[in-house]
Amino acid sequence: MKNKKQQEDLNQSGNPNSSKTNNQNQNPVQAQNRNKESKNHQTKLISSDLQFNIDHIKKTVGNSSDIVIRDFQAGKNGEIKLGIVYTDGLTDSASIQDFILDTLMVEIRNSDLDVAVPDCFEMIKSHILPVGGIVEINEFQKLFNHVLSGDTMLLMDGSPKGMALGSRDWADRGVQEPSSQTVVRGPKDGFTETLRTNTALIRRRIKDPNLWLETKQIGEKTQTDVAIMYLKGVANDKTVSELQSRLNRINIDAILESGYIEELIQDEVYTPFPTVYNTERPDAVAAAILEGRIAILIDGTPFVLVVPALMVHFFQSSEDYYQRADIATLIRVLRYLSFFLALLTPSLYIAVSTFHQEMLPTPLLISLASQREGVPFPAFVEAMLMEVVFEILREAGVRMPRAIGSSISIVGALVIGQAAVEAGFVSATMVIIVSLTAICSFVFPANSMAMAFRMLRFLFMILAATFGLYGIILGLIVMVLHLNSIRSFGLPYLAPNAPFILQDQKDNIIRMPHWSLLKRPRLISKNDTDRGEVSSPKPPR
């Protein structure tokens, strides 16, 4: 009885005439309250009046030309009044014509369908429409979400609910090779801007029913689809709950790229070091999920976020696991060496040439002094000038058209560097140091970590110009203390180095063979840490 009364009230709220009749029998205050309640129902809930629903949709979207609304009649005598709503450009027009309109306007007319309207709704849903995905909708907000996402909405006169029919088909970029994280050996496919394509690329690699996918919409205006993928039973349940809680707390009008989500869920705000990993590579995300981490996929961007992210992850590349263990170890050692060169080379030059000349051999000191004889600036100004100019050239190369961007940046660096040396503004040694620093900064697989080193480089240059080597040592101490205080979803940022975990050292700076990597990282996955049982290969006797 209660459900029947709610249905009658809903029908009355969707019908303006019935609402008007009831208001005549009430005093002005009750009538005003009744009108407000009716207006709220009309705004939020779908009415049983088809024409009212169509008018409300047209009014809400402002008669936008890309929102197609078509009303028609079905049944032998046209007793069933229907309407469809879809967005032109986001839907598959052929499927709408063949599987929706043709089915409802032709096949129903030739059938023996002769039932009441409420039963007709269920009959169309269960026995007539040959559409894969059908979702019942009774709110206008959900109706607009489906329509503006590419689905087709079917409305029926006399029924206070509609059906969202899956017909999404918009133009996308297609699967291409990642542009930011290239490899010599390994898969060449990369994520796209379409969420369902990205989830399929991961499903293709992990064919496990425990790979769970949870999707929600974030953004009051954009209603962006945000999905999280993780292996149930492998990922830490506390980390999954914490991530869901942080996503639920997001209250913002727009999510246009994964960078929005990254800033809103990260542990540390005032730090140059990234605590959320982002990548374009499906194989990297699949490997992270198999370790027990969680992937965050955002519709509209090819960059997928991975949490938790520790500092060692930013020094690792997917290709490390496709090469032999000794080659991967050598490459990782080169990355850590490049890390110190990119961070400290300009500051060490400033400190030694300004405060600690006695540390240099006499022939080298004489050579540096002769080169700086005509330079009017101190070493700090000289280094700062060259570093700023190089950062400008690098940024200009990124923003310029692709056809001329790389050539302009390279030619500009060579011409400006040579002209600056000949003009006596900088020394040749400084050009070499800046070039070495720039090359080392490109070694890192993750661009977000390279950006952190580029920022800290200027801070170390200021410390070196102020206190010499003592300033550099002080800066390193402060940086290490800061890194020890950072957390990524509760995990220590420097793990497995601090705290030191002996088991995880097999995949840290040294990459051991695959047959010895039989345990997942202890801090990341606490549920299922075993990867299998594989013995070391042995030659036949």
Image (cartoon, rainbow, N blue to C red):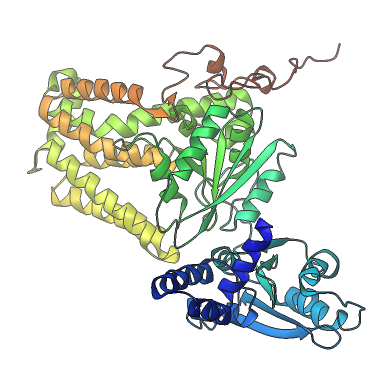
Residue placed most toward the observer, 140 or 313: 140
Q: Nearer the viewer, residue 324 or 478?
A: 478
For this view, does 150 lie left or right of residue 340? right
Tell me where residue 325 appears, x and y as whole percent: 61, 24
- Name the residue furthest left: 376
Query: Could you say where residue 510 lies in the image, as x and y percent from the top left?
Result: 53, 20
Q: Is residue 483 above or below residue 94?
A: above
Task: Pick the residue in front: 441 or 368.
Answer: 441
Task: Pick the quarter of the image with the C terminus.
Answer: top right
- Would residue 516 be visible to someone looking at this image? yes
* Depth check, front residue: 242 or 83: 83
Picture layout, residue 431 above or below residue 76: above
Please state the horizontal and vertical placement of residue 101, each as a whole percent of the image.
77, 80
Residue 171 visible to the viewer: no
443 above or below 87? above
**Based on the displayed image, in which of its 4 quarters is residue 237 positioned?**
top right
Image position of 137 with respect to 423: above or below = below
Instruction: Please state, as top left, top right, bottom left or bottom right, where the N terminus lies in the image.
Output: bottom right
Whether residue 379 sits left or right of residue 496 in the image: it is left
> Residue 38: percent from the left, percent from the top?
50, 71
Image point (63%, 38%), residue name: 286
Q: How many marks?
A: 0
**In the displayed structure, does residue 193 sit left or right of residue 475?**
right
